[in-house]
Image (cartoon, rainbow, N blue to C red):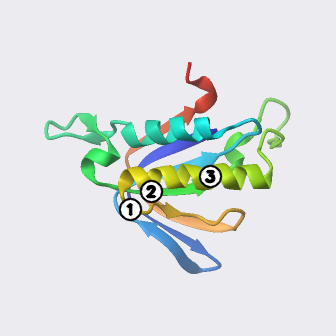
Amino acid sequence: MRIVIQRSLGSRLSIDGELFSEAGAGLMILVGVETGDTEADAEWLADKALGMRIFNDDAGVMNRSVLDVGGDVMAVSQFTLTSSTRKGRRPSYIRAAGHDVAVGLYEYFCSLLDRALSKPCARGKFGADMKIAFTNDGPVTIIVDSRLKE
């Protein structure tokens, strides 16, 4: 699994021109699930994302996590994070997990966030054509891949 974590001042997700979900200041997390990913990958990434110290403390140093600051989280499934661009100019998505596996691991990842935050994280709708508006704060953007944890 691969995630992109972005510190955000707030986010809004629309489907077919209608607001579907929104989150206040905190994190925007894009989630890509690959073939072979497991619940252990989701657990490791959820812990990593929630514990990432990318919010400023009183001294202006990035030393606080989203849990420390009581922030919101929006997590959106994005299969394009699994793309391979090694050959040619058209990305290959052959490493993307199949629908059933990807939906299950994405939902499991979100449930882990819900539990740790003690509130629901904002979500996208798997497979939908979503429009996301958010303000990247900093900007701060971190990429984390569960296959590179060792």
Front-lying residue, 119 or 59:
119
Secondary structure found at label 3: helix
Mark on residue 47?
Answer: none
Locate residue 68 relative to residue 126 in the image: left or right: left
- Which numbered disc flags the more N-terminal residue, 2 or 1? 2
Furthest-top residue in this view: 150
- Residue 65 lies, in percent from the top left, at 32, 41
Q: Give the residue type that dot 1 points to.
A: Lys
Residue beneath label 1, please? 119
- Name the residue located 50 percent from the left edge and 71 percent from the top edge: 21
Q: Residues within 10 Å of mark 3 (few under 14, many from 20)?
A: many
Q: Quadrant for residue 100, please give it.
A: bottom right
* Disc 2 crowd, CA 10 A, few/some/many (<14, 14-19, 20+): some
Label 1 CA crowd tier, 10 Å (few <14, some 14–19, many 20+): few
Q: Which mark is residue 114?
A: 2
Percent position of residue 20, x then y: 54, 75
C-alpha distance separating marks 1 and 3: 17 Å
41 shown above or below 23: above
Q: Secondary structure at mark 2?
A: helix
Inspect the image, locate mark 2, and give the three-letter code of the amino acid beneath it: Asp
Which residue lies under the disc numbered 3? 106
Could you tell which of marks 3 and 2 lies nearer the N-terminus? 3
